[in-house]
Amino acid sequence: MHSYLRPLARILIGLLFIFSGFSKIVAFSAVSGMMGAAGFPAPGILLVVAIIIELAGGIMLAVGYRVREASIVLALFLVPTTLVFHVAAIDGTQQGQMEIVATLKNLAIIGGLLHLIAGGARAAEQGMERESSASHAV
């Protein structure tokens, strides 16, 4: 049972980034406009970079490829994203309360990524290697 929990956690975190990347593609103009309004230079270019990071990193997590590296990039991506888009928008309004929740969710995601960086990914990848070598030995 426990052998399925690490890959499941990795896949669920990966799916979050895959969904987020695709949703940015669908709403490209709106997201680019929001980034421009936040003061980002060349928001279209930065948005393309964000989409690539989210899709590539999410897919890498989901399939278990270079999980540690993907987790590092995604965690580093989430820090400024959280600060600029969520923490900066916290105020006394209802929207500000929603930004607190979004900030806490991102912190929880960063925590999951840190777990993968610290060794959770290594254990999952070693499990995949053992399964692969066991199937070749038969």
Image (cartoon, helix red, strand yellow):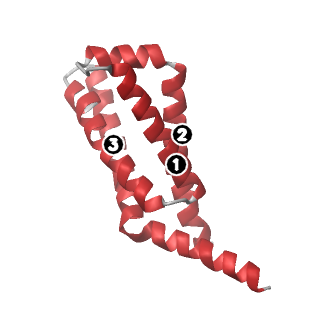
Q: What residue is rendered at 57% in x and 62% in y? A: 7
Amino acid under disc 1: Gly
9 w.r.t. 43: above or below: below
In the picture, the quarter occupied by the C terminus is bottom right
Q: Nearer the viewer, mark 3 or mark 1?
A: 3
> Which is more N-terminal, label 1 or label 3?
1
Query: Could you tell me the amino acid type at mark 3?
Result: Phe
- Residue wearing tag 1: 14
Q: Out of 58 and 44, give the one closest to the viewer.
A: 44
Q: Position of residue 79 (x, y in %)?
A: 27, 43
Say which residue label 2 marks: 18
Task: Identify the disc placed on residue 77.
Answer: 3
| Dot placed on the residue nearer the N-terminal end, 2 or 3 | 2
Quarter assignment of residue 34: top left
Left or right, 138 with respect to 50, comes to right
Numbered circle sitting on residue 101: none
For the residue labelled by badge 2, is the local secondary structure a helix, a strand or a loop? helix
- Residue projecting furthest to the right: 138
Depth check: give the residue in front, 38 or 136.
Answer: 136
- Do the CB atoms of the residues marked 2 and 1 lie less than 8 Å apart? yes
Is residue 70 shown left or right of residue 131? Answer: left
**Real-space Cα separation, disc 2 to disc 1, in angstroms:** 6 Å
